[in-house]
Structure formats: structure tokens, C-alpha cells
Image (cartoon, rainbow, N blue to C red):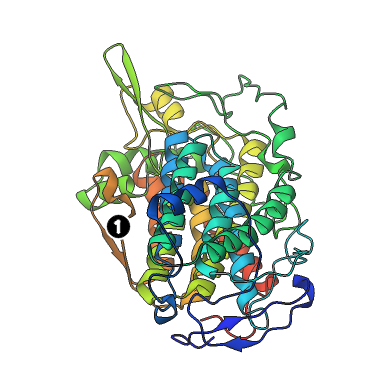
Amino acid sequence: MIRGVKYAVMIRGPINALSVEYKFSSCRILRGSLLPYLFILLIFVASGCQGDKRDLTETTDDIHLFHESVGVYTTVIVHDIFSPPVASRNYVYPLIAAYEVARLSDRSNYYTLAGQINGLTEITIEKEIEDICLPLAVTYAFLKTGKYFVFSESKIDEQIESVAEYYSDSGLSRQTIMASMELGGKVSDQIIDWASKDGYKESRSYAKFTIDNQPQTWKPTPPAYMEGIEPHWNLIRPFVIDSATQFAPPPPTPFDMTPGSPFYKELIEVYEAVKFADEEQFEIAHFWDCNPYKMNVTGHVMHATKKITPGGHWISIVGIACKSEGADILRSTAAYALTAIALADGFISCWDEKYRSILIRPETVINEYIDESWMPLLQTPPFPEYTSGHSVISSAAAVVLTHIFGDNFFFEDDTEVIYGLPVRSYNSFKQASDEAAISRLYGGIHYMPAIEHGVTQGLAIGQLVVDRIQIFNGSIN
């Protein structure tokens, strides 16, 4: 696509048989009908909108509200306290919905994900669509789909109102606003229907994980001693991988507390990594902590600190890269969707291994055999050790982002500033993913094989995503 060119797209007939006619216009106008959203009408009444106040055809791609909405959605996920695998599901469907709307403006170059990812069939629009502002339609599809996955629905409604009010105040006609939301809503409904069949609802009623007394088996860890989360996540329908076992890593090192054994050496490596951590290693560990529910104990009082999930951190990096490059709405939604798919499949694959090997965490073994007063730098997450989730999903995301933006892409990651941590800079996505992986050793929560095999697992998943999904006609970077 040529950036900076303003055009409109005339859509006639169903989406699976579009005829596209390029004309000059601003918001990439597609054509559609009215939908009476009450709160949007109230905005029009309150603002006294009588039609276009400002010619939006003079603007370039207006996608800042889409990026903003992704950020708002992340704050809702943090607020509602979703576990890392569940959060990855919460992101992937709304971001796919956003992409499927965006690609309608350039379907000869950007291909649908339908037929390329598991279970997603053709997305259809039955009516003729008129007067569509593409950024608004995309943002609404994202928010409407996202609302389905969270508890704090009112916060999503507030963002929808804010977006609609922005376009109303900018002078976009009420007809275009309503039609844009109708198109976004139609795509969203089909994505939600597809999502509802992925096995998640059924998994809520599956049996809880049963803890045994084998010395090598994972046990709940302090301070909350929470039970293992999402032991059946391998049964969630994947997106690109054939099954949760497709990239199963080799088994972990056999548990053996004989001094000098391979497992004992791995354990001591973790013990000493924390004991002798320097300032840089300390900072790296905390920067990539991404613990959505850290429990803090003061005397007899326990309270939680909410933070972004590992997947949420990488979704933030997607936004940083898109804004740094000045990517338009098509390229941005493609980057978000592909990365979210890699993250989602990464968690499915990783969780499959976690509850197969059910390996004990370093903190438990060190406290029992080595030093009862030792504590990791990071709070040990409530699930088995092998493989390292951050290693898997970070490596998968880095492959996708490198495919889209290139190998030597400098960026400054300010994701954790909101949590009191400094900005960190990277010369490539791989450098960032490697740092995320090794942070688990510095933090004292993983043995090295979980990190190394997790990286291998993630690289394979990310490569499969870019090999199997054809999203752009030509080179995307």
C-alpha cells in the first residue's frame, strides 16, 4: 500500500466477492448502513453534531485511538487479574477481529486469516456497506470483541464512547460513525462465535490438578501456596500448531539430589545466580517479571500487586514498534494479530509440557535441601517449572516481529515504567526475547534447561506462524 494516499473503497455485494474502486477520501471510506446505538446517539445530541465540522479527508491514517484502545484493554486485563495463558486468549481474538476489518480496505494485498488458522471460516457481511471510516470500524471491532473476554465490561464501554465522541467532535457524520460500528460489530460477532467453540468454557469444569508426594513433582510455593493454574490449557484449540504436542521439548533433567549430578548442578546454578546477582541482572529479572498477581506479605497481612502478563508485555512491544515505524492501520493490525497468534500457541504448547513433566520449582528444592532461608528474586509462579513460559512466548513473538519489522530494529521498551521500572533499549526483538528468557534464571524461578528448551520451543512456534500464515501479498517488511 502507498502511504499518505487518501482514498475511499466502494464495497458492493458480500465481502467474499468484493469489487474495489479507489477514490480520494480520508478515512478510507468503505460504504454502509445505519445502526441505532443509543449511547452514540446521545453523544450526537450532547455535542449538537449537525454533520461534518472538519474535513477528515485532509488527515492521514488516524490510528492513534486504536493503539490507545489496545492500551486500555491491557489495563482492563491487569485489573481483572487474568493468568498468563488466559490473557493470551483474551488478546488474540480481539486483535484478529481488528485485522479482519482492516484488511477489507486492501484485500488484494492483505489476506484473510480464515482458512489459515484452525476453525476460522469465511467472514461474511450480508448487507451492502456504505460510508465507513476504517480506523473507527477497526477499533470498534477490537473493543466489542474484547468486551466478551473481560469482567470489567463498563471500562470497555467507556472507551467505546470515548472513541465515538472523538470522531463526532472531529466532524465525522453520524451516518459514517454508525455504519463504521455496524461493520466492526458484524465482524466481531463472527469472531466471538468462533472463539466460543475453542474449548475454554468446557475447561472451566475440568478436574483440578492433583498434587502427589513424589520428590520431583511440583508443589505449591510461598507465600500464597496457590494451586496449579490452567492444568488443562493444552486442550484449548490452537491457532496454527497442529496440536499442543507438536513441539514438545525433550524431558527435563531427571531429579537427582546427589552432589555433582546434572540436576544438582542446575539447582546450584539457580541458587548462586540469585545469591550473586549484580545490579544489571537484578534489573533484568524485575523488568521481565510480568507477574499478574504478586502476593505481598507484611506480618499477618497479605495483599496483591497487579502487573502486566508476559503476553501483555509483548503486545505492548508490538505497539511500540508500530508507532516507532509509523505503521499504518493495516500493517499495525497485521503485526498485532500475528504476534498474538504466536503468543497464544506458545502458551498452549508450553502448558502442555508443564503438566506432563510437572517438575518441581527451584525454590521448593533449595529450601528443603540446600538453604531454608533462600528466596528467589521473583515470586515463584503457581504452576510447574518446565518449560519456561516467558522463554517460549518471547521467542515466538520475536520471530514474528522480526519477520514483520526486520532483524535490526532498535526500540525503547517503556512497558514497565508504569510499574516503577526504567526504560530498557534493544537493538532487535531477538535481543529482547533472549533477555526475557535469561531473566528467569536471574529471578531464581527456572533451571537453565527450561530456559534453553523453552527458547527452542518458542522459535519453532514462531517460525511455523510466519511459514503457514500468508498475510501479505509480497514481503511484509
317 to the left or right of 301: right
Q: Residue furthest left?
A: 279
Residue occupying the point 56% across, 64% down? 175
Number of marks present in the image shown: 1
Would residue 58 be visible to someone looking at this image? yes
Residue 165 placed where, x, y %? 42, 55
The image shows residue 47 at horizontal and vertical percentages of 38, 54
Percent from the top left, x then y, of residue 214?
Answer: 61, 23
Above or below, 42 against 127 in this view is above
User: Which quadrant of the figure has residue 468?
Assistant: bottom right
In-front residue for pair 26/447? 26
**Residue drawn at (49%, 53%) of the image:** 391
Res 409 seen here: no
Q: Amino acid at mark 1?
A: Asp
Q: Which residue position is annotated with label 1?
A: 414
| In this rendering, position of residue 410 left or right of residue 147 | left
Instruction: Identify the element where label 1 is drawn.
Output: loop
